[in-house]
Amino acid sequence: MAEISINGTTRTNFGKGASRRDRKAGLVPAVIYGHGAVPQHVSLPAKEMGTALKTSNVLLDINFDGKVELTLPKSVTKHPITGILEHIDLLVVRRGEKVTVEVPIHTTGEHDRDGILEHVNNSIEVEVEATSIPSFIELSIQGMASNTSKYAGDVILPAGTKLVSDPHMIVVHLSEKSTAAEETPVAAVETAATPAAPAAETK
């Protein structure tokens, strides 16, 4: 998995005003917490963080005040319109320890072309060593028939990875194509071809 080093600085000013000044300077406020330690407030370069966060479950080595904290992004807040990073929560992790994370699912193979594939859940929850989190896990849908599903329990996990999600949780479902769209035009033609009833005679 990816591990990226980011240089940060300790935050000493707080509140909305301080956060706005950080963002104006190209920085994003962040909190580093975990392992019973007092939360540490830092400012990180927004551009570098934005690039790093494009990788799912990326490990971040945060360098500040002469020390390095190995962290895992747990919560990312973005502006709803601009998409600018507003705040990040980073969980301290230790090499060799197990963490529970959501990992994206990528499907492989060809399913029955008469069906429509529905992604019911795009990720599954697993327990894995902090430094061995996969960026994604593949789920084979080769030969999958219409009106069938693939479940979390069908996913073949990498060595050392344990499924936390309910094994009966549906990941993808292959539904049958509806024939309603094909039947409607026929019905419309038949209706149009039906002769109108003669008007009642006026006495």
Image (cartoon, helix red, strand yellow):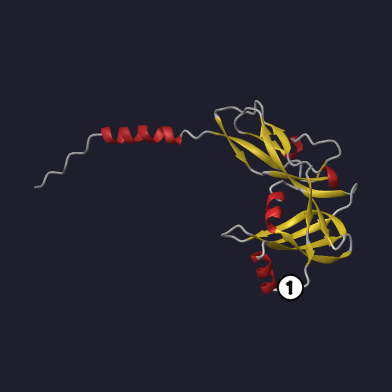
Please determine whether, in this image, residue 76 is positioned above or below residue 135: below
For the question of whether residue 129 can be seen, the reply is no
Q: Is residue 159 found left or right of 199 in the rendered image?
A: right
* Along the viewing direction, whichever of 118 and 185 lies nearer the viewer: 118
* Along the viewing direction, whichever of 169 and 200 lies nearer the viewer: 169
Q: Position of residue 138 (x, y in %)?
A: 72, 35
- Mark 1 residue crowding within 10 angstroms, few (<14) / some (14–19) / many (20+): few
Q: Quadrant of the N terminus?
A: top right
* Along the viewing direction, whichever of 98 and 18 lies nearer the viewer: 18
Q: In the image as oriented, which residue stretches furthest toward the right? A: 96
Q: In the image as oriented, which residue stretches furthest toward the left? A: 203
* Count of numbered circles in the view: 1
Q: Residue at x 39, y 36 (%)?
A: 184
Q: Position of residue 144 (x, y in %)?
A: 64, 28
Q: State the SS at label 1.
A: loop
Q: Residue at x 68, y 37 (%)?
A: 106
Q: Position of residue 113 (x, y in %)?
A: 56, 27
Q: Quadrant of residue 120?
A: top right
Please determine whether, in this image, residue 128 is positioned above or below residue 9: above
Q: Quadrant of residue 30?
A: bottom right
Q: Residue at x 72, y 50 (%)?
A: 52
Q: In the image as oriented, which residue stretches furthest toward the top? A: 143
For the question of whether residue 182 can be seen, the reply is yes
The amino acid at mark 1 is Phe
Residue identified by numbered label 1: 14
Q: Residue at x 76, y 44 (%)?
A: 166
Please determine whether, in this image, residue 135 is positioned above or below residue 7: above
Q: Position of residue 61 (x, y in %)?
A: 82, 53
